[in-house]
């Protein structure tokens, strides 16, 4: 599954190279119309712990699945989960997610195989930087795995069918 990246800040959508590309809802609708089932959002405001763009997620989740990178901030995570957004947390993390009911919406972005030991509360994994050790360790956890488009060519062909999604810039 192809998963386009959308950067959001101050209620505007940007490409990964920083160009303003318009209203996030309209851009996401174009991705959806082009076949996207899931959109990976890098929310620059949410990464700072701000809930500035919640109205956008309320609109997006009516027609497409989104996963949002955000800060380790439980009130913010609860708000995103209330809109049925998948929430992406980078490892290492310091929060206790065991009390959250919507664990199927938690996604762990990981770059160190040692951090996989804390993946129990997360439903899916995103490999921030591909390495054979990280990929093979992640496979053993029986979780869905996503990789970035820049790393896909490094994944051996025998494992490519085990990838749930490929996150890439729409201009790739």
Image (cartoon, rainbow, N blue to C red):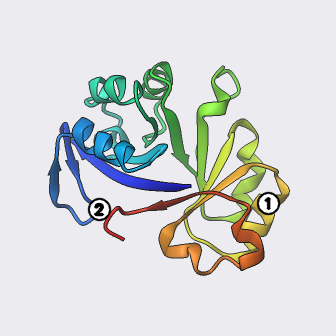
Q: Is residue 57 left or right of residue 132?
A: left
Residue at image location 79% in from the left, 60% down from the top: 139
Measured along the vertical axis of the image, is residue 89 above or below residue 128? above
Task: Say the numbered circle drawn on residue 139.
Answer: 1
- Residue 92 in view of the camera: no
Residue at disc 1, secondary structure: helix
Q: Is residue 79 left or right of residue 43?
A: right
- Residue 133 in view of the camera: yes
CA–CA distance in space, label 1 to label 2: 28 Å
Measured along the vertical axis of the image, is residue 12 above or below residue 53? below
| Marked residue nearer the N-terminal end (1 or 2) | 2
State which quadrant residue 116 falls in: bottom right
Identify which residue, 63 or 129, lies in the foreground.
63
Q: Is residue 83 left or right of residue 48?
A: right
State which quadrant residue 163 falls in: bottom right
User: How many C-alpha atoms fall within 10 Å of the one at disc 2: few (<14), some, or many (≥20)?
Assistant: some
- In the rendered picture of this protein, how many numbered marks are placed on residues? 2
Estimate the x, y position of residue 75 in percent, counting from the top left.
45, 22
Residue on which the image places disc 2: 16
Residue at image location 49% in from the left, 22% down from the top: 78
Given contact means CB atoms under 8 Å apart, are the residues at marks 1 and 2 in contact? no
Q: Is residue 152 left or right of residue 171?
A: right
Identify which residue, 31 or 117, lies in the foreground.
31
Estimate the x, y position of residue 96 in percent, counting from the top left.
65, 31
Estimate the x, y position of residue 172 in percent, counting from the top left.
36, 71
Residue at disc 2, secondary structure: loop
């Amino acid at each position: 599954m192809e998963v386009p990246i959308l950067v959001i800040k101050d209620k505007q959508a940007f490409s990964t190279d920083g160009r303003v590309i318009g209203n996030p809802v309209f851009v996401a609708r174009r991705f959806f119309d082009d076949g996207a089932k899931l959109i990976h959002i890098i929310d620059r405001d949410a990464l700072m712990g701000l809930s500035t763009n919640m109205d956008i997620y309320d609109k997006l989740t009516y027609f497409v699945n989104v996963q949002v990178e955000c800060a380790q901030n439980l009130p913010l995570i609860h708000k995103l989960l209330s809109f049925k957004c998948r929430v992406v947390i980078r490892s290492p993390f310091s929060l206790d997610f065991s009390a959250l009911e919507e664990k199927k919406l938690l996604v762990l972005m990981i770059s160190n195989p040692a951090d996989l030991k804390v993946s129990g509360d997360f439903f899916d994994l995103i490999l921030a930087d591909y390495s054979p050790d990280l990929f093979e360790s992640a496979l053993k956890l029986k979780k869905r795995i996503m990789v970035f488009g820049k790393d896909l060519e490094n994944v051996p062909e025998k494992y490519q069918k085990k990838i749930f999604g490929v996150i890439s810039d729409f201009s790739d």
